[in-house]
């Protein structure tokens, strides 16, 4: 079981709060790492922005770069109107990024490797899109599903495709993040298991374990890249969907 690549995704109950309405509420390892992610983000930002100086410290530079990076992404995707939602988008980016990075440490838990978490985040995004869309445009927001310039005979089919595409957004948004984190950690665990297994086979096994070890190092670096990239992709798609709510006629 030590080399089981699936075991690392097992949700373990730490303690139970009891049952409410027949549903059990408990603190799990997933809950702990989500709380840890929030604590890491809060601690870093408060520490980096306390006592700000003209010549920034390293922590302050990182915080400012992250702020500017996401702010520029929001502006370029949604326009200046989208900056009203910058706190939500910035928080979402930092949470996904931190959860991804925490999962890279040995014996830590990867929160974003569970579909229920990524789907909850995706539904939060789509709920915000719907609320903003109907609050700003009323029923005219539904014009998002009726592209301009489409011939009337095929308009019902195009509208149906647009509706299905919109409804599939939370599924694709959640599956993309979940699938990348799950698959990457499984592959990394498999190669790391090869190293341990071959290292236990003596000198010949140790020599043969050089290639799996090299692949493990390369995959680890690649997974760090994927952790940041997937957080960015999730953020960009959030901005794209928000832009549809702000400008449904585009």
Image (tube, rainbow, N blue to C red):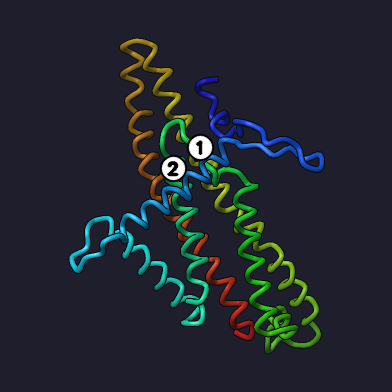
Q: Which image quarter holds the C terminus? A: bottom right
* Viewer-proximal residue among 113 and 218: 113
Q: Residues within 10 Å of mark 1 (few under 14, many from 20)?
A: many
| Position of residue 60 in the picture relative to residue 195 (left or right) | left
Image height check: is 18 above or below 222?
above
Q: Measuring 43% from the left and 55% from the top, which residue is drawn there?
A: 229
Q: Residue furthest top?
A: 202
| Position of residue 1 in the picture relative to residue 23 (left or right) | left
Quadrant in which residue 72 is drawn: bottom left
The secondary element bearing badge 1 is classed as loop
- The numbered disc on residue 148 is none
Q: Measuring 47% from the left and 31% from the top, which residue is drawn there?
A: 189
* Viewer-proximal residue among 218 and 6: 6
Residue 201 picture location, percent across and down: 39, 11
Image height check: is 161 above or below 35?
below
Image height check: is 188 above or below 120?
above
Q: Residues within 10 Å of mark 2 (few under 14, many from 20)?
A: many
Residue named by callout 2: 102
| Position of residue 107 in the picture relative to residue 134 (left or right) | left
Residue 48 picture location, percent across and down: 31, 57
Residue 183 picture location, percent across and down: 53, 41
Quadrant in which residue 62 is drawn: bottom left
Image height check: is 45 above or below 196?
below
| Position of residue 170 in the picture relative to residue 41 (left or right) | right
The secondary element bearing badge 2 is classed as helix
Q: Measuring 67% from the left and 73% from the top, which residue is drawn there?
A: 131
* Cβ atoms under marks 2 and 1 closer than 8 Å: yes
Q: Which image quarter holds the N terminus? A: top right
Residue 138 picture location, percent across and down: 72, 84
Q: Measuring 45% from the left and 35% from the top, which residue is drawn there?
A: 188
Residue named by callout 1: 109
Alpha-carbon span between mark 2 and mark 1: 7 Å
């Amino acid at each position: 079981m030590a080399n089981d690549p699936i075991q690392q995704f097992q949700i373990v109950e730490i303690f139970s709060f009891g049952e409410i309405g027949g549903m059990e509420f408990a603190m799990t390892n997933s809950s702990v790492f989500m709380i840890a992610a929030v604590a890491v983000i809060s601690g870093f930002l408060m520490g980096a922005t306390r006592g700000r100086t003209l010549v920034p410290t390293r922590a302050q530079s990182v915080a400012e770069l992250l702020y500017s990076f996401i702010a520029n992404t929001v502006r370029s995707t949604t326009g200046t109107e989208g900056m009203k939602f910058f706190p939500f988008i910035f928080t979402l980016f930092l949470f996904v990024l931190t959860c991804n990075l925490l999962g890279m440490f040995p014996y830590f838990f990867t929160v974003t490797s569970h579909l229920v978490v990524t789907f909850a985040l995706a539904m939060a995004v789509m709920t915000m899109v719907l609320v903003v869309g109907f609050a700003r445009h009323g029923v005219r927001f539904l014009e998002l599903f009726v592209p301009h310039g489409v011939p009337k005979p095929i308009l019902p089919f195009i509208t149906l495709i647009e509706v299905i595409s919109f409804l599939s957004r939370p599924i694709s948004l959640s599956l993309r993040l979940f699938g990348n984190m799950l698959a990457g950690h499984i592959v990394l665990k498999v190669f790391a298991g090869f190293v341990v297994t071959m290292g236990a086979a003596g000198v010949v096994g140790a020599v043969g374990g050089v290639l799996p070890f090299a692949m493990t190092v390369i995959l680890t670096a690649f997974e760090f890249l994927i952790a940041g990239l997937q957080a960015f992709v999730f953020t960009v798609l959030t901005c794209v969907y928000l832009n549809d709510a702000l400008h449904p006629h585009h």
